[in-house]
Image (tube, coloured by chain):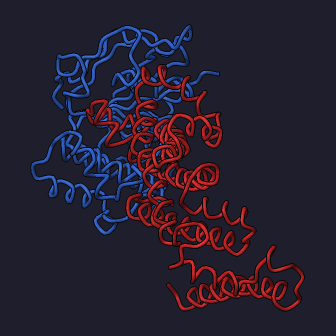
Chain colours: A blue, B red
């Protein structure tokens, strides 16, 4: 992995009124890496990503994307939210098209949509509406929408929180494969330590509120990872210990 | 549709038709057979039908044929309704989307909307007379308010996460409005239009009853003055039929335009 810094976060702080949620967080994200962020539930992980993208205006601090101030209008960023975010009034195909249209990437748009649908295995369901799909399919629509725009930075906020274990492993493998294939930089938030160890190149462990970084763990186990391997279990235990707040 | 479902739907239709038929039969029995009410107070369905058919071409006693009344009412109600929708829907959207518009217009609007449209009739008659403009203005008021309220609510209920999706894909505020907020509010907007249509049709009849020289409401009112219950019933039935047709047109448009709804 090359170590070019893609995103540089310095002294990021976010307050809601008097409540300090993010307390002076600084870290780098390297080009092409899969960075997992874990922390105790309710520690402000979502606020963390939302501040990072300026969906919430940070109270102070700076986020640089390839050396410039981060700007959603200019930079190719995609965000997969915790809630289902497929547009109910659009078909699967139109949902995937939606991101490309907003990004004004009209060139070869039909091919891009087709490829993205194929990537997540939804070609057959291109003309379905979201209400006709299952939970995992809905999440795959959103993944396809994100990948279709070929983002330089992909943010994922507990995208599989509501899925069962089997599906989760399948979609996790899928996402790792997609990211490696497209060399996308990913920030992936989860409260599931096993998921983080399974996916991440590095794992950023957060503390309880007010949130700061407890430790950044490098995870160099080879893919595909075996969750029963002793190295895997050891790393999982290590992170569990870091995260303990009781 | 499966065979069973088709059979079920067919049965339901038969039941509906029977119920309607039963209603008319009961009416017939009460009036023509048992003679429970004098004909001047409650005419039989056959008499009403007869009046309806002759009224189609006869101008007596109220000065216009039935098609002329229908046309007069339809013209006023559609005029008022269209203006109400064309102004009300964008206004509701604007108020919901731009905070400044909300702050300026909401207090005025919240006050005005508590006044029932019918309460506007006297002032409208004084200001504008009993012509088309006066009646259309009353219809406009009653159509306009539900359009604003529902469009406003629709835009305000846009899911935060959908807005965020648009924002992360770099959409400007105006683009977000057209690509995210309005499509997601469309079911609400249509509900608003349907409510509008109903209330505009209702206030039209009220306006015509109070001050007018043509239209279905006027015909009913004259029927009362002349003690012609059959004329009143014909008027009511035609009002019902017209309202149903207009609602059906809107339902059809909703089906074509609102996608992916439950």
Q: Residue at x 64, y 33 (%)?
A: B114
Left or right: where B116 falls relative to B249: right
Left or right: where A30 falls relative to B44: left
Horizontal and vertical percent position of residue B241: 57, 71
Residue B115 figure quarter:
top right
Left or right: where A173 falls relative to B32: left
Horizontal and vertical percent position of residue B152: 49, 37
Q: Is residue B29 above or below residue A69?
A: below
Q: Residue at x 18, y 44 (%)?
A: A182
Q: Nearer the viewer, residue B8 or A187?
A: B8
Q: Is residue B66 above or below residue A175?
A: below
Q: Is residue A75 above or below residue A102?
A: above
Could one spot residue B242 in this view of the protein?
A: yes
Q: Nearer the viewer, residue B161 or A204?
A: B161
Could one spot residue A132 in this view of the protein?
A: no
Horizontal and vertical percent position of residue B47: 70, 84
Q: Residue at x 43, y 37 (%)?
A: B161
Q: Residue at x 33, y 25 (%)?
A: A53
Q: Nearer the viewer, residue A117 or B139?
A: B139
Residue B164 figure quarter:
top left
Q: Nearer the viewer, residue B221 or B161?
A: B221
Horizontal and vertical percent position of residue A62: 30, 11
């Amino acid at each position: 992995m090359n170590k070019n810094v893609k995103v540089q976060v310095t002294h990021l702080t976010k307050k809601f009124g008097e409540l300090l949620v993010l307390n002076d967080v600084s870290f780098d994200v390297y080009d092409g890496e899969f960075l997992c962020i874990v922390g105790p539930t309710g520690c402000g992980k979502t606020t963390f990503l939302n501040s990072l993208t300026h969906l919430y205006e940070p109270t102070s601090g700076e986020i640089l994307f390839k050396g410039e101030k981060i700007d959603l209008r200019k930079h190719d960023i995609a965000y997969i939210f915790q809630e289902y975010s497929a547009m109910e009034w659009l078909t699967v195909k139109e949902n995937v098209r939606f991101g490309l249209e907003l990004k004004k990437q009209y060139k070869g748009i039909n091919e891009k949509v087709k490829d993205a649908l194929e990537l997540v295995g939804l070609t057959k369901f291109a003309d379905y509406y979201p209400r006709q799909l299952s939970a995992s399919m809905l999440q795959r629509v959103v993944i396809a929408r994100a990948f279709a725009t070929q983002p330089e930075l992909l943010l994922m906020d507990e995208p599989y929180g509501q899925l069962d274990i089997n599906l989760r492993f399948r979609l996790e493998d899928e996402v790792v494969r997609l990211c490696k294939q497209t060399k996308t930089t990913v920030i992936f938030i989860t409260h599931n330590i096993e998921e983080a160890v399974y996916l991440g190149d590095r794992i950023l462990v957060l503390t309880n509120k007010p949130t700061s970084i407890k430790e950044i763990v490098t995870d160099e186990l080879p893919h595909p990872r075996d969750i029963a391997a002793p190295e895997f279990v050891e790393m999982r235990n290590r992170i569990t210990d870091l995260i303990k707040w009781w | 549709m499966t065979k069973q479902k088709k059979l079920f739907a067919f049965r339901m239709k038969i039941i509906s038709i029977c119920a309607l038929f039963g209603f008319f039969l009961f009416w017939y029995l009460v009036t023509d057979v048992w003679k429970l009410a004098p004909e001047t107070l409650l005419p039989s369905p056959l008499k009403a039908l007869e009046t309806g058919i002759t009224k189609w071409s006869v101008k007596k006693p109220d000065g216009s044929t039935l098609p002329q009344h229908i046309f007069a009412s339809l013209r006023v109600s559609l005029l008022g309704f269209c203006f109400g929708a064309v102004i009300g829907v964008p206004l509701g959207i604007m108020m919901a989307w731009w905070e400044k518009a909300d702050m300026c217009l909401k207090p005025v609007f919240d006050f005005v909307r508590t006044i029932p449209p019918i309460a506007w009739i006297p002032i409208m008659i004084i200001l504008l007379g009993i012509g088309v403009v006066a009646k259309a203005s009353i219809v406009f008021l009653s159509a306009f308010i539900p359009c604003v309220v529902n469009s406003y609510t629709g835009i305000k209920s846009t899911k935060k996460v959908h807005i965020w999706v648009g924002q992360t894909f770099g959409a400007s505020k105006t683009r977000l409005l057209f690509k995210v907020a309005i499509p997601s509010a469309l079911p609400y907007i249509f509900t608003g239009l349907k409510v509008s249509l109903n209330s505009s049709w209702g206030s039209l009849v009220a306006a015509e009853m109070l001050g007018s020289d043509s239209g279905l409401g006027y015909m009913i009112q004259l029927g009362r003055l002349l003690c012609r219950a059959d004329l009143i019933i014909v008027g009511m039935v035609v009002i019902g039929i017209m309202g149903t047709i207009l609602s059906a047109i809107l339902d059809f448009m909703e089906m074509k335009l609102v996608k992916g709804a439950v």
